[in-house]
Image: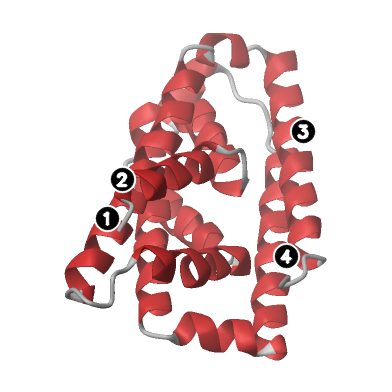
Amino acid sequence: MDYWLFLLICLVATFSPGPAVLLAIKNSANFGFWQSMKGVAGNVAAVMTLASLSAAGLGAIILASDLLFSLIKVLGGLYLMYLGVKAWNTRYTKPTLQKESKPLTTGKKLFTEAYVVGMSNPKAIAFYTAVFPQFIDLNQAVLPQFCLLAGTFACCSMVGLGFYALATTSISQYLARENINRLFHRLTGGIFIGFGLSLIFVNKS
């Protein structure tokens, strides 16, 4: 198993901009770094779930079924568009009031939101189904190798998304300005809607 090549692929995949990265940036800007990490944890949970489904052979079944693949991508695309509309319509609140409106229960909502985003991308299923087998040596115990690969991808995902969330906190005061805050939410909302549309029209190939 060429582990270092797999690690490089994971880093490129997790640091590349996409819905999970955008969600981490948005959550960090709105709720702060530590709250946004609860959303990152949701994405990592989705990574482990999808990797497990692929290992169990369900990923191949989904890819083989046009109906299942289409259903997942349409639902996933609609959910991303819903997040986009919600971000677009976010009302500006002053920073002093915004801090008071950050309850601890927000973490559960952020976790669930990120988990759904991670689970609703059929291209992620295709990635695990196509890439993982290339790095597993069938002459050795498969389970330890799978755990190593899945764990590596999950760690890379946490590091990558955490990096974007931390970077966002450095400009949080700038984003707190009313005109910039409104522009930020319109921009992230528009990008989410774009991601949703692209997911709906994506092909399996």
Tell me the CA gap for discs 4 and 1: 29 Å
Q: x%, y% of residue 120?
A: 58, 67
Labelled pair 1, 2 in contact (Cβ < 8 Å) = yes
Q: x%, y% of residue 9?
A: 47, 46
* Mark earlier in primary sequence (3, 1): 1
Tell me the CA gap for discs 3 and 2: 31 Å
Q: Nearer the viewer, residue 89 or 168?
A: 168
Residue 106 in view? no
Say if 84 sits above or below 22 in the image.
below
Say if 6 sits above or below 54 in the image.
above
Q: x%, y% of residue 79?
A: 66, 62
**Residue occupied by mark 1:** 151
Task: Answer with the quarter of the image where residue 112 lies.
Answer: bottom left
**Residue occupied by mark 3:** 186
Q: Which amino acid type is shown beneath numbered disc 2?
A: Cys
Say if 119 sits above or below 56 in the image.
above
Q: Which callout, 4 or 1, points to the residue nearer the camera?
A: 1
Q: What secondary structure is found at the residue carrying circle 4?
A: helix
For the C terminus, give its image quadrant.
bottom right
Q: Which amino acid type is shown beneath numbered disc 1?
A: Gly
Residue at 72% across / 87% down in the picture? Answer: 66
Q: How many marks?
A: 4
**Residue occupied by mark 2:** 155
Q: What secondary structure is found at the residue carrying circle 2?
A: helix
* Mark earlier in primary sequence (3, 2): 2
Labelled pair 4, 1 in contact (Cβ < 8 Å) = no
**Residue occupied by mark 4:** 78
Residue at 61% across / 65% down in the picture? Answer: 123
Labelled pair 3, 1 in contact (Cβ < 8 Å) = no
* Mark earlier in primary sequence (4, 1): 4
Q: What secondary structure is found at the residue carrying circle 3?
A: helix
